[in-house]
Image (spheres, rainbow, N blue to C red):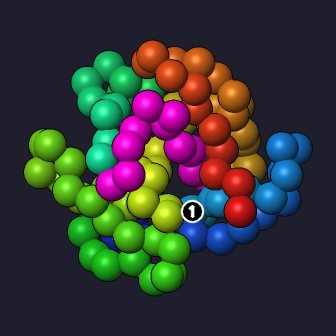
Amino acid sequence: MANAPDTAAAVRPSSPGQILVDADGHTLYLFARDTPNTSTCYGRCASIWPPLRTTVGVNSSQLGTTKRADGTVQVTYNGSPLYYYVGDTKPGDVTGDGIFSCGAMWYAVRS
C-alpha cells in the first residue's frame, strides 16, 4: 500500500460517513500533527501509518503532492499529507479513525 503509481481517490460511504479511499478501496488518513504540505510522520510513525506515495501526478483538483524529508513524494488532499493505517487489513476498513498515535490524532479523510 505504500506506493500508488496511478494515484486516484474516490469517496465511499463508511461507518464514520463519506470518506476518501484509494483506487483499491483502502481508507486514507490525515495526521493532526501535520502542517499544510508538510509531513511529520517518519520512522516508527511511518511504519504504522505508511504515507501514500506516488511517482506520477495526481488526477484531482483537491489532490496534490509534497516532497518528504526523505526525498520521496507524498500525495496530499487539500494540502494535508495522506497515509494508510497498517491495522486496516482489507478495503473498507476504517480502524484507524479517531486513534491517538505518534503524538496526535488520526482521522479518516472525510469528503
Q: Residues within 10 Å of mark 1 (few under 14, many from 20)?
A: many
**107 to 66, vertically: above or below:** above
Observer-nearest of 87 and 43: 43
| Residue under the image location 80 percent in, 58 percent down | 18
User: How far from the left and from the top, in percent, is residue 96?
Assistant: 64, 31
Is 35 magenta? The answer is yes
The amino acid type of the residue labelled 1 equals Asp
Q: In what element is the residue under mark 1?
A: strand
Q: Can residue 18 be seen at all in this image of the molecule?
A: yes
Give the residue at mark 1.
22
| Residue under the image location 69 percent in, 34 percent down | 97
The image quadrant that residue 105 belongs to is top right
Q: Is residue 80 left or right of residue 105?
A: left
* Viewport quadrant of the C terminus: bottom right
User: How far from the left and from the top, in percent, is residue 80?
Assistant: 45, 53
Observer-nearest of 67 and 86: 67
The number of numbered badges drawn on the structure is: 1
Observer-nearest of 20 and 35: 35
Is 81 magenta? The answer is no
Q: Is residue 107 left or right of residue 44?
A: right
Q: Main structural element of the magenta stretch: helix, strand or loop?
A: loop
Q: Can residue 52 be seen at all in this image of the molecule?
A: no
| Residue under the image location 83 percent in, 44 percent down | 16
Q: Is residue 59 left or right of residue 46?
A: right
**70 to 74, vertically: above or below:** above
Stretch in magenta: 26-37
| Residue under the image location 14 percent in, 43 percent down | 69
User: How far from the left and from the top, in percent, is residue 103?
Assistant: 45, 16
Residue found at the far front of this picture: 35
